[in-house]
Amino acid sequence: MTKQLDLTKLDLMDALDLAILIEQEAMERYEELTAVMREHRTEEAASFFHFMAKAEAKHGADLLTERSKLFGRAARRVDRSLLWDVEAPGYETVHDFMTLREALKVAMDAEVKAYDYFDRALKLPLAPAVKKLFEELREDEIAHQDMVKKELAKAPPDEAANPEDFADEPVAQ
């Protein structure tokens, strides 16, 4: 049986913990995608996914600092089993040999997904401090979308890929 997260029962500490876990999940997914892209020698996509992993890690660290200031070392009551793919790019959105432009679109979809999560949550009867935090997090997602849009505007258009460009050299038998 899957545990369900009732956002209406969160206090500020739980909400901060949830936000930290969301950032950690996204960071870990971007690290996975970085490794896959590097394995397939698509360095532009790998570099961008690495950049996103660092950005998610920084945002998570900022939230952890805030949590520590407010609640010290109080035990976490929210765990990763209560969330899945809130901001992390979905596995179904990536493929081998991605271009930079495709990687940017994956990140944009993830930022929109996170915005939608907080936007839906704000329609619930939340504790005032939780509502304020979720409003800030939703606004952060808009800023992240704007950053990705700027990168998309600078990215070169995709060229028609030749599968031979990505083929491995023959291996001696």
Image (spheres, rainbow, N blue to C red):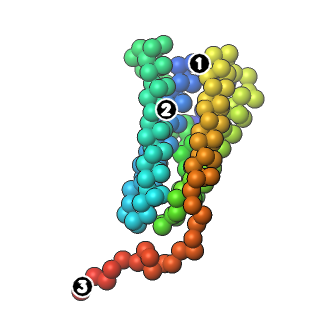
Name the quarter where the C terminus is drawn.
bottom left
Q: Amino acid at mark 2?
A: His
Which residue matches tag 2? 59
97 displayed left or right of 105: left
- Mark 3 or 1: the one toward you: 3
The image shows residue 123 at horizontal and vertical percentages of: 75, 29
Q: Amino acid at mark 3?
A: Ala
Earlier in the chain: of badge 2 and badge 3, it is 2
How packed mark 3 is, by other alpha carbons closer than 10 Å (few <14, some 14-19, many 20 or more), is: few
Vertical placement of residue 36 versus 173, above or below: above
Q: Pick the residue in front: 164 or 159.
A: 159
Q: Residue at x 45, y 80 (%)?
A: 164
SS label for mark 1: loop
Which residue matches tag 1? 11
Earlier in the chain: of badge 3 and badge 1, it is 1
Vertical placement of residue 79 versus 10, above or below: below
SS label for mark 2: helix
Q: Residue at x 33, y 80 (%)?
A: 169
How packed mark 2 is, by other alpha carbons closer than 10 Å (few <14, some 14-19, many 20 or more), is: some
The image shows residue 53 at horizontal and vertical percentages of: 45, 44
